[in-house]
Amino acid sequence: MAANQTTTVVNLPTFQRFFRGAGGLDVDKDDLKRYSDFIFRKIQDLLVMAQASARFNDRGMIEDWDLPITKGLQECQHAFEKMDEAIELQPILGHLAARPQLDLPYSEELERRLPLIAGGVSVALARAFKIIEPTLKNPGSEHWERAFRVFDTLL
Protein backbone atom coordinates (compact mmCIF):
# COMPACT_ATOMS: atom_id res chain seq x y z
CA MET A 1 0.00 0.00 0.00
CA ALA A 2 1.45 3.35 -0.98
CA ALA A 3 1.82 6.02 1.67
CA ASN A 4 -0.61 8.32 -0.10
CA GLN A 5 -3.34 5.67 0.10
CA THR A 6 -3.16 5.15 3.85
CA THR A 7 -5.47 7.99 4.83
CA THR A 8 -8.49 6.12 3.49
CA VAL A 9 -7.88 3.22 5.89
CA VAL A 10 -8.19 5.02 9.26
CA ASN A 11 -11.51 6.65 9.98
CA LEU A 12 -11.31 10.10 11.49
CA PRO A 13 -13.41 9.52 14.64
CA THR A 14 -11.32 6.46 15.65
CA PHE A 15 -8.12 8.42 15.01
CA GLN A 16 -9.42 11.33 17.10
CA ARG A 17 -10.46 9.06 20.00
CA PHE A 18 -7.04 7.45 19.99
CA PHE A 19 -5.10 10.72 20.18
CA ARG A 20 -7.46 12.14 22.78
CA GLY A 21 -6.91 9.05 24.95
CA ALA A 22 -3.18 8.66 24.32
CA GLY A 23 -2.13 12.27 24.68
CA GLY A 24 -5.09 14.54 25.38
CA LEU A 25 -4.73 15.91 21.85
CA ASP A 26 -7.35 17.18 19.43
CA VAL A 27 -6.42 16.18 15.89
CA ASP A 28 -8.13 16.78 12.57
CA LYS A 29 -8.29 15.43 9.03
CA ASP A 30 -4.99 17.10 8.02
CA ASP A 31 -3.28 15.38 10.95
CA LEU A 32 -4.60 12.01 9.78
CA LYS A 33 -2.52 12.21 6.59
CA ARG A 34 0.60 13.22 8.54
CA TYR A 35 0.03 10.38 11.00
CA SER A 36 -0.54 7.75 8.30
CA ASP A 37 2.61 8.76 6.44
CA PHE A 38 4.58 8.79 9.72
CA ILE A 39 3.49 5.26 10.68
CA PHE A 40 4.33 4.01 7.19
CA ARG A 41 7.86 5.50 7.38
CA LYS A 42 8.65 4.39 10.94
CA ILE A 43 7.51 0.80 10.41
CA GLN A 44 9.57 0.73 7.24
CA ASP A 45 12.60 2.05 9.15
CA LEU A 46 12.20 -0.62 11.82
CA LEU A 47 11.86 -3.35 9.19
CA VAL A 48 14.98 -2.22 7.32
CA MET A 49 16.97 -2.48 10.56
CA ALA A 50 15.38 -5.86 11.31
CA GLN A 51 16.46 -7.10 7.89
CA ALA A 52 20.03 -5.98 8.61
CA SER A 53 19.93 -7.91 11.90
CA ALA A 54 18.63 -11.07 10.20
CA ARG A 55 21.38 -10.84 7.59
CA PHE A 56 24.04 -10.23 10.22
CA ASN A 57 22.87 -13.39 12.00
CA ASP A 58 22.95 -15.28 8.70
CA ARG A 59 19.22 -15.99 8.58
CA GLY A 60 17.06 -15.99 5.47
CA MET A 61 13.95 -14.66 7.22
CA ILE A 62 13.19 -11.57 9.32
CA GLU A 63 11.93 -12.61 12.75
CA ASP A 64 10.09 -10.43 15.25
CA TRP A 65 13.12 -10.43 17.57
CA ASP A 66 15.15 -8.74 14.80
CA LEU A 67 13.17 -5.53 15.29
CA PRO A 68 15.04 -2.87 17.30
CA ILE A 69 12.34 -2.52 19.97
CA THR A 70 13.49 -0.39 22.90
CA LYS A 71 12.17 -0.65 26.45
CA GLY A 72 10.24 2.58 25.95
CA LEU A 73 8.63 1.38 22.72
CA GLN A 74 7.73 -1.91 24.39
CA GLU A 75 6.03 0.01 27.22
CA CYS A 76 4.12 2.05 24.63
CA GLN A 77 2.98 -1.20 23.00
CA HIS A 78 1.59 -2.36 26.36
CA ALA A 79 -0.18 0.99 26.81
CA PHE A 80 -1.60 0.65 23.31
CA GLU A 81 -2.94 -2.83 24.07
CA LYS A 82 -4.83 -1.48 27.09
CA MET A 83 -6.25 1.45 25.11
CA ASP A 84 -7.06 -0.63 22.07
CA GLU A 85 -9.64 -2.71 23.91
CA ALA A 86 -11.96 0.32 23.79
CA ILE A 87 -10.80 1.99 20.57
CA GLU A 88 -10.19 -1.07 18.37
CA LEU A 89 -7.50 0.60 16.28
CA GLN A 90 -5.26 -2.47 15.88
CA PRO A 91 -7.09 -3.90 12.80
CA ILE A 92 -6.77 -0.52 11.09
CA LEU A 93 -3.08 -0.31 11.99
CA GLY A 94 -2.65 -3.69 10.33
CA HIS A 95 -3.31 -1.94 7.03
CA LEU A 96 -0.95 0.94 7.82
CA ALA A 97 1.78 -1.43 8.95
CA ALA A 98 1.52 -3.65 5.86
CA ARG A 99 4.79 -3.40 4.00
CA PRO A 100 6.05 -4.26 0.58
CA GLN A 101 8.40 -7.20 0.77
CA LEU A 102 12.02 -6.44 1.53
CA ASP A 103 14.80 -8.70 0.25
CA LEU A 104 14.10 -11.21 3.04
CA PRO A 105 10.65 -12.62 3.85
CA TYR A 106 8.90 -11.88 7.16
CA SER A 107 8.04 -14.59 9.67
CA GLU A 108 4.36 -15.11 10.50
CA GLU A 109 5.01 -13.87 14.04
CA LEU A 110 6.51 -10.64 12.71
CA GLU A 111 3.52 -10.10 10.40
CA ARG A 112 1.20 -10.68 13.34
CA ARG A 113 3.07 -8.20 15.57
CA LEU A 114 3.26 -5.30 13.10
CA PRO A 115 -0.11 -3.73 14.08
CA LEU A 116 0.89 -3.83 17.76
CA ILE A 117 4.24 -2.23 16.95
CA ALA A 118 2.46 0.46 14.93
CA GLY A 119 0.22 1.01 17.95
CA GLY A 120 3.23 1.39 20.22
CA VAL A 121 4.80 3.89 17.84
CA SER A 122 1.46 5.75 17.81
CA VAL A 123 1.34 5.99 21.61
CA ALA A 124 4.97 7.13 21.64
CA LEU A 125 4.11 9.83 19.08
CA ALA A 126 1.18 11.12 21.14
CA ARG A 127 3.36 11.20 24.25
CA ALA A 128 6.17 12.94 22.37
CA PHE A 129 3.87 15.85 21.54
CA LYS A 130 3.26 16.37 25.27
CA ILE A 131 6.97 16.12 26.05
CA ILE A 132 7.80 18.68 23.36
CA GLU A 133 5.02 21.03 24.51
CA PRO A 134 3.22 19.95 27.72
CA THR A 135 0.21 22.27 27.29
CA LEU A 136 -0.37 21.37 23.64
CA LYS A 137 -3.97 20.54 22.70
CA ASN A 138 -4.09 20.86 18.92
CA PRO A 139 -0.80 20.04 17.17
CA GLY A 140 0.05 22.19 14.18
CA SER A 141 2.47 21.56 11.34
CA GLU A 142 5.45 22.76 13.37
CA HIS A 143 4.62 20.31 16.20
CA TRP A 144 4.35 17.39 13.79
CA GLU A 145 7.68 18.34 12.21
CA ARG A 146 9.40 18.52 15.62
CA ALA A 147 8.01 15.13 16.62
CA PHE A 148 9.08 13.63 13.27
CA ARG A 149 12.61 14.96 13.77
CA VAL A 150 12.78 13.39 17.24
CA PHE A 151 11.65 10.01 15.88
CA ASP A 152 13.96 10.22 12.88
CA THR A 153 16.82 10.75 15.33
CA LEU A 154 15.85 7.86 17.62
CA LEU A 155 14.22 5.22 15.41
Image (tube, rainbow, N blue to C red):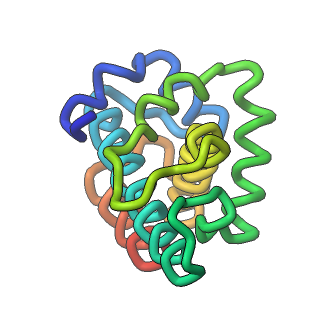
Find residue 2 and report its image quarter.
top left
The residue positioned farthest toward the bottom in the image shown:
56
- Write the residue at 29% across / 20% down: 8
**In the visual, does 154 lie left or right of 102?**
right
- Write the residue at 59% across / 65% down: 67
Asked whether 98 or 4 is in front, the reply is 98
**In the visual, does 107 lie left or right of 149?**
right
Percent x, y of residue 9: 36, 21
On screen, residue 43 above or below 29: below
- Write the residue at 47% across / 33% down: 26
On screen, residue 72 above or below 82: below
Percent x, y of residue 94: 51, 31
On screen, residue 76 above or below 147: above
Asked whether 102 or 26 is in front, the reply is 102
Percent x, y of residue 127: 61, 55
Find residue 142 and report its image quarter.
bottom left
Q: How many marks?
A: 0
Asked whether 126 or 39 is in front, the reply is 39
Percent x, y of residue 96: 41, 35
**Residue 23 in view of the camera:** no
**Residue 71 in view of the camera:** yes
Asked whether 98 or 79 is in front, the reply is 98
